[in-house]
Each structure stands twice: as structure tokens, then as C-alpha cells.
Image (tube, rainbow, N blue to C red):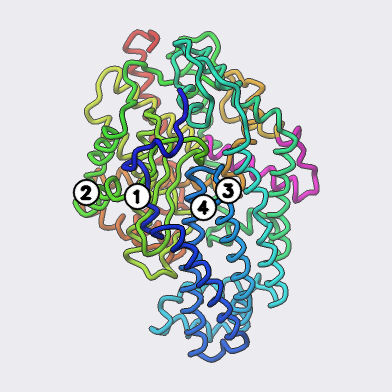
């Protein structure tokens, strides 16, 4: 299987970035217009005590940020289409540089506002004229203790030009430079190895093919492990630098503070999942029995337990399946969702140089965009539901909130996407029997394994890596790989062989360059289980509450936004409900397997 060049992908399977800028020339016009007018922001320096000047300054800042967002997102998404194209590499770099310059020019705003009294800031936040900025002003009150002097803030903003270098280095390595050995599939055909094909090959019925794909993938990272470790260490040390400068005791504390989420949520997740690892180990043992293999390997954890019930399907059928599953949301949601598939929201198939994985992104005033690398696996079907959950969340937030309040924190960002996955799974289970039911039960368990347990394992690895840096311990390749290997054993138990190459898995996780992000996938599933069940049980009455969650943007603190959907992550209830659902699903799968005589699925 050879990857296609992008020019050979039909237009109907490409997103329509022309909805942001009709062409590169329009991008250039906006770029130069922004470059010329952004200097005006500096004219307000020292004048923000005057309410008229403050309002004008904030309005101008919003306008400049809006244009900058369009410039950067267009350039970056063009680059993601084919990371080898130097034109879009350059446009992305130029947008980055303008972002740093604008950030530096406007660095005075936060210190000047922070210098105002708490009473004055609260008074401004309560005025109708400043209603769009009420959250911004309230956040300044909360952030007063960590906002530094004008000079110090300027220095930190200037550091932004290289602060994300580790992420950029990894992105280019992971999408453009890393080379994998080809793999021979079970039909004797040579397969060009890629991130997308790796996911496909891990579901191959041949254990030998799965092993070959696993070795091709992880040997490539092992062969560069010292470079990758040094790069990741730089990212971790950068986090600690910014945390110390602002007076935080740890990088995690800084990250959680930035989203206005109490650190207790991180600890509560690790504690709850820690209690559930026995059930996880039991599932791994059951998987070995159902596969009928003498030895279960890490590369055997992704293959479907029931070959005949695979839900792999062409893209068009996957779209219809997802739309049907989400009809429980009501007509408005369904109509908007349908337009996503026809109106240029989605870039569907993998091509040479395209960014791996999947994401949803966009800018205010334009519909969201979704990047896929659809290969037809059952996982890819669920990815459609997942990424459209993100897109619909953004759509409702943008439609309901002013630009300054539309963006939601990452903490709530993974909830709507996971709700869609759970609803798709339960929709399919309603009519499933026999081996199809067995497949879906195992898929749901794997959703818990990969989203709740695995992401929590990632979160624990991140916590350990950052703690090492904070204690002055060296972040060597051996230290990082050994820490990861120990956690792999903790979470997966003794029923699986912990293949030595798995110790290098951390080196290929892009999200580790967005520190303390991955735990939110786990809390997202925890919340999503409750929300999905409530939608199915209570229908339109509950969906209206969920719609409030989708539409809230960043108008409230994240935990308060989630409470709009009647989920409180400061209590034990949602964690207990998620663990109970995992255990109940495991019981159902084990019971079905035992009733079948315990034969290989």
C-alpha cells in the first residue's frame, strides 16, 4: 500500500481552508495589514486607568488577536496537509514571529490592569460595556499574585519565540524525518510503514505482522532515543522555568492554575484509576484467553477479539453510522453535524507528508475544521465521532459567546468528543448479537483501557518526569525509559509480556509536548460516561442541560461549566460510575465468553 500524494486525493475529501482565506494572496494581505496596525496597541501604554482608553485597547487587542488566529491557523493547517512544503513552513514561522511581536507589544496590558485595585477590576467586570471582558478582568484578579512587572512580562513574552522549540523539533521529526522499515503483511505484500498504517497493522490477524509493525515503529524511536530524550528534557525544563518564575511549587501546579482547576482533580483521578487496576489486569488476562495465544504481547492489545465482527467500513458508511448514533441529541445538533460532512469541515485521508493523528481546530467566525487520517478501521469510525464532538463543542460555544469568552479550557475539551464515542458505542450495542456484541463489549473496554487507564498512565509518567526535573535529577534516555517501563507493568499487570521495546513508547507521544494535557482525556471519559447515560435515559430534558455545557465556552470556571451538565468532578460519584461501568462491561464480556464454552473468539 503506497501513500498518495495530496494532489491525487479527491477534493470532496479535503477540508476547505479557503473559508478562512480564499488564497495565499489574501493571507499575505492580512499578514501585512496586521503587521502595520498592531503597533497601535502600544499607544495605550500607561493610559488604561481611563475607561475609554481601556475599552478601546481591549477592543483593538481582540481584533488583532482575531486576525492573528486566522493567519496562524491557516498557515499551520496548510503545513499539516504536507509538512514537506517549505512555503507553509515559512508562513507558519512568520505567523509565529508576528505572534511573539504582538505579545511583546501588548505585554503592558496585564501588568497595568493588575496594578488596579481588586475593587476597580470587579467594578469594571460588572459593567455592561465590559461584559465581553468580564472573565478576562476576573481572571486578572485571580492572577494578581503571579503577574510580574512590565519589564519581566515583556522578557517572558519575548521568550515565546523559542519556548515551543522542543515541540516544533518533535513535530518535524515525527512527521517529516523519521523513517520506518517496511512491513510485510499477511498477504505477502510490502507495506510502507507510517503512523496511520501502524494503527492498521496492529489490528492484523497475524501476530507476526503485528510484531513486525511494533518493531518497525519502536526501533525507529529507539535508534534516536538519546536525541528525543534531550529534546523532551528541554520541554520539561522549560515548564519548570516558567513555573518557578511565577512562584509555583511545581509545573503541574502552574498548569492546573492556568485552567482554574484544583490540583486535587489530578490526584483524585490517579487514586481512582489506581483502585481500578485490578479490574484492568483481569481484562488483560481475559483478552489473552479470548485470543487463544500462549503469550500475550503489548502489540496484541489492539487486535479485535472477534475477527468476523470487525466494524471496519468505507468512509461514507462510517459517516452515516455516526450521524445515526448522534440523532439522540435532537434535530438542531443533527442538522449542524450533517453540514460538517458536506461543507468543507473535514480533511479525510492520509497522504504523503500529512500530519499524523487527528484533531479539530478553527478560528472564531469560521466553522471548525477536522483533520483525519482515515484508513477504514473500527477505531477510525470512532475517531470521526470523537473529532466531530470537538467540532460541535466549538460550534456551539462560538455561536453563543462573544469572542473573548468563546474559547474553552482544555480541561473540558475532551468531554464532548468522548460523549460522542460512548453514544456511538451504545448505539451499535443496541442491535448487536453474538460475535458483534462481543466485539463491541471489548471495544468499550478498550476505550476505557486506552482513554482512562492508558492516559492516566501517561499522566503519571508526566508527573514523574517533571518531578525529576524539579528535584534536579537528570532526564536521561535511560531514566525516562525505565520510569515508563515500570508504569507499563503497573497498569497492565502480569498477564501480558512487557516487550522491552515498549519502554520507548513515551518518545512517540506528541501530547507530552503539551504538558499535563493527557490526564484530561481520562477525566473526559469519566465525565462522558455520566453525560451519555443521562442523554440516553432522560432525553431532551437532559440534553438542554448538556447544550448549556456545549454553549458555555469559557464563560465560567471549567468545573462550574461541567456542573451545568450535572457532573461534579470534585466528588467521587463520576469516578465511581465510570469504574462501575468498566467492571460491568467486563463482567458481560467474560460471561458471554464463558457461555460460548471459552473457545477462541
User: In the rendered structure, does residue 268 fall within the stretch colored magenta?
Assistant: no
* Comes first in the chain, label 3 or label 2: 3
Residue placed under numbered mark 2 in the picture: 539
The mark found on residue 345 in the picture is 1
Residue 284: x percent and y percent? 50, 22
Residue segment shown in magenta:
454-480
- The kind of secondary structure the magenta stretch mainly shows is helix
Q: Nearer the viewer, mark 1 or mark 2?
A: 1
In this view, the residue in front, 448 or 510, is: 510
* Comes first in the chain, label 3 or label 4: 4
Residue 210 shown left or right of residue 215 in the figure: left
Badge 3: few (under 14), some or many (20 or more) residues near its Cα, within 10 Å? few
Residue 326: x percent and y percent? 26, 43
Residue occupying image coordinates x 44% and y 32%: 4
The answer to whether the residue labelled 4 contacts the one labelled 2, judged by CB atoms less than 8 Å apart, is no
Q: Nearer the viewer, mark 1 or mark 3?
A: 3
* Comes first in the chain, label 4 or label 1: 4
User: In the rendered structure, does residue 465 fall within the stretch colored magenta?
Assistant: yes
In this view, the residue in front, 396 or 287, is: 396
- Is 97 located above or below residue 287 in the figure? below
Cα–Cα gap, marks 4 and 2: 39 Å
Residue 19: x percent and y percent? 36, 57
Residue occupying image coordinates x 51% and y 26%: 198
Cα–Cα gap, marks 1 and 3: 24 Å
Disc 1, SS: loop
Amino acid at each position: 500500500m503506497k501513500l498518495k500524494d495530496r494532489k491525487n486525493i479527491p477534493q470532496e475529501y479535503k477540508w476547505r481552508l479557503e473559508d478562512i482565506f480564499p488564497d495565499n494572496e489574501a493571507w499575505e494581505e492580512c499578514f501585512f495589514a496586521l503587521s502595520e496596525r498592531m503597533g497601535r496597541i502600544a499607544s495605550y501604554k500607561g493610559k488604561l486607568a481611563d475607561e475609554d482608553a481601556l475599552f478601546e485597547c481591549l477592543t483593538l487587542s481582540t481584533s488583532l488577536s482575531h486576525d492573528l488566529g486566522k493567519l496562524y491557523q491557516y498557515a499551520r493547517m496548510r503545513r499539516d496537509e504536507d509538512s514537506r512544503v517549505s512555503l507553509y513552513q515559512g508562513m507558519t514561522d512568520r505567523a509565529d514571529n508576528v505572534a511573539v511581536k504582538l505579545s511583546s507589544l501588548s505585554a503592558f496590558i496585564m501588568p497595568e490592569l493588575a496594578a488596579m485595585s481588586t475593587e476597580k477590576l470587579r467594578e469594571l467586570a460588572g459593567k455592561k460595556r465590559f461584559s465581553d471582558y468580564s472573565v478576562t478582568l476576573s481572571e486578572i484578579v485571580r492572577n494578581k499574585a503571579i503577574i510580574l512587572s512590565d519589564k519581566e512580562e515583556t522578557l517572558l513574552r519575548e521568550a515565546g519565540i523559542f519556548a515551543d522549540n522542543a515541540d516544533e523539533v518533535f513535530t518535524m521529526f515525527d512527521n517529516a524525518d523519521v523513517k520506518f522499515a517496511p512491513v510485510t503483511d499477511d498477504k505477502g505484500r510490502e507495506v510502507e510503514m507510517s503512523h496511520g498504517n501502524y494503527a492498521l497493522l496492529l489490528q492484523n490477524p497475524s501476530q507476526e505482522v503485528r510484531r513486525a509493525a511494533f518493531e518497525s515503529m519502536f526501533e525507529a524511536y529507539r535508534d534516536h532515543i538519546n536525541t528525543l530524550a534531550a529534546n523532551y528534557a528541554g520541554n520539561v525544563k522549560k515548564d519548570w522555568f516558567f513555573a518557578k518564575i511565577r512562584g509555583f511549587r511545581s509545573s503541574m501546579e502552574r498548569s492546573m492554575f492556568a485552567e482554574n482547576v484544583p490540583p486535587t482533580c489530578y490526584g483524585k483521578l490517579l487514586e481512582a484509576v489506581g483502585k481500578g487496576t485490578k479490574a484492568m489486569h483481569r481484562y488483560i488476562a481475559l483478552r489473552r484467553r479470548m485470543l487463544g495465544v500462549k503469550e500475550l504481547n503489548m502489540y496484541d492489545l489492539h487486535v479485535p477479539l472477534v475477527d468476523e465482527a470487525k466494524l471496519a467500513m468505507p468512509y461514507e458508511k462510517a459517516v452515516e453510522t455516526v450521524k445515526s448514533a448522534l440523532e439522540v441529541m435532537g434535530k438542531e445538533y443533527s442538522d449542524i453535524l450533517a453540514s460538517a460532512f458536506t461543507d468543507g469541515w473535514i480533511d479525510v485521508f492520509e497522504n504523503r507528508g500529512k500530519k499524523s493523528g487527528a484533531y479539530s481546530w478553527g478560528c472564531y467566525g469560521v466553522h471548525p475544521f477536522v483533520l483525519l487520517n482515515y484508513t477504514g478501521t473500527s477505531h477510525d469510525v470512532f475517531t470521526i465521532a470523537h473529532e466531530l464532538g470537538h467540532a460541535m463543542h466549538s460550534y456551539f460555544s462560538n455561536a453563543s459567546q462573544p469572542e473573548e469568552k468563546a474559547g474553552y479550557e482544555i480541561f473540558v475539551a475532551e468531554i464532548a468528543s468522548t460523549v460522542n464515542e460512548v453514544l456511538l458505542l451504545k448505539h451499535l450495542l443496541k442491535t448487536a448479537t453474538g460475535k458483534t456484541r462481543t466485539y463491541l463489549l471489548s471495544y468499550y473496554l478498550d476505550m476505557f483501557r486506552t482513554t482512562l487507564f492508558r492516559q492516566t498512565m501517561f499522566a503519571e509518567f508526566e508527573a514523574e518526569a517533571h518531578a525529576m526535573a524539579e528535584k534536579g535529577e537528570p532526564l536521561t534516555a535511560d531514566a525516562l525509559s525505565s520510569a515508563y517501563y515500570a508504569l507499563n507493568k503497573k497498569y497492565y499487570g502480569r498477564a501480558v509480556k512487557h516487550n522491552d521495546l515498549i519502554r520507548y513508547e513515551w518518545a512517540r507521544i506528541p501530547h507530552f509536548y503539551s504538558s499535563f494535557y493527557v490526564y484530561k482525556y481520562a477525566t473526559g471519559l469519566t465525565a462522558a460516561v455520566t453525560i451519555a447515560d443521562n442523554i440516553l435515559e432522560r432525553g431532551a430534558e437532559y440534553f438542554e442541560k448538556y447544550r448549556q455545557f456545549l454553549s458555555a465556552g469559557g464563560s465560567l470556571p471549567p468545573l462550574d461549566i461541567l456542573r451545568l451538565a450535572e457532573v461534579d468532578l470534585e466528588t467521587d460519584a463520576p469516578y465511581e460510575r465510570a469504574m462501575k461501568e468498566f467492571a460491568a462491561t467486563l463482567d458481560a464480556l467474560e460471561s458471554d465468553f464463558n457461555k460460548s464454552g471459552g473457545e477462541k473468539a
